[in-house]
Amino acid sequence: MDEYTLKWLYDIKQAITEIESYFDGKDMDFLQYRNNIMLKRAVERDLEIIGEALNRILKRDENYQDKISHARSIVGLRNHVIHAYDSVSDENIWSILIAHLPKLKNEIDSLIDKNGDF
C-alpha cells in the first residue's frame, strides 16, 4: 500500500472516530439526532470526508472495491450529501450510522493494521 492510500485510510478512521465522539456518553437516540441540526451537519460532513477519501483510494487502486464493503455506495452517499443536500434522509443517515459504520470501521482498522504504521 502506498503512502497516499494509507493517509486516506487514516482520514476515514479519523472521520469515524469523530462521528463516534459525537455520541460519547450519550445514548444513540434517533429523535435527538433528528432534532439536533449541528449534530446532523457534523455527521454529514464526516460522511463526506469518508466518501471523498474512499473515492481517492478507488481511483488509485480499484482493488479496494473488494476490500471495503459497499465502497461504491459510500462514494455515492458522499455525492448525494453534497449534491442533493435537500433530499438527505435523516432515517437513511441514521441507518448508516447504526448498521454500516461499525463494519466500515473494522475493515479500515484491518487494512491499516495489515500495513503497519507510517
Image (cartoon, rainbow, N blue to C red):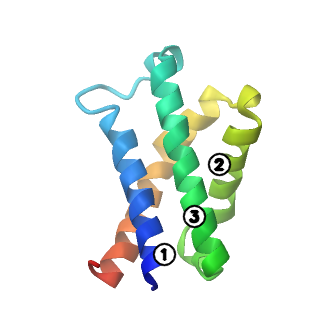
Above or below residue 62? Residue 16 is above
Classify residue 10 as left or right of residue 65.
Answer: left
- Spatial distance from mark 1 to mark 2, Cα to Cα? 18 Å
Q: How many marks?
A: 3
Check disc 2 and report its element: helix, strand or loop. Answer: helix
Classify residue 111 as left or right of residue 97.
Answer: left
Q: Tag 2: residue type?
A: Arg
Does the image show residue 53?
Answer: yes
CB within 8 Å, label 3 to label 2: yes
CB within 8 Å, label 3 to label 1: no
Q: Which is more N-terminal, label 1 or label 3?
A: 1
Residue at mark 3: 54
Q: Residue 64's quadrant in the figure? A: bottom right
Above or below residue 29? Residue 47 is below
Classify residue 44 as left or right of residue 81.
Answer: left
Q: Which mark is residue 5?
A: 1
Q: Residue furthest left?
A: 25
Q: Position of residue 39 (x, y in %)?
A: 45, 25
Residue at screen point 48% across, 76% down: 4
Q: Tag 1: residue type?
A: Thr
Q: Tag 3: residue type?
A: Leu
Q: Position of residue 45 (x, y in %)?
A: 53, 39
Which label sits in the foreground, 1 or 2? 1
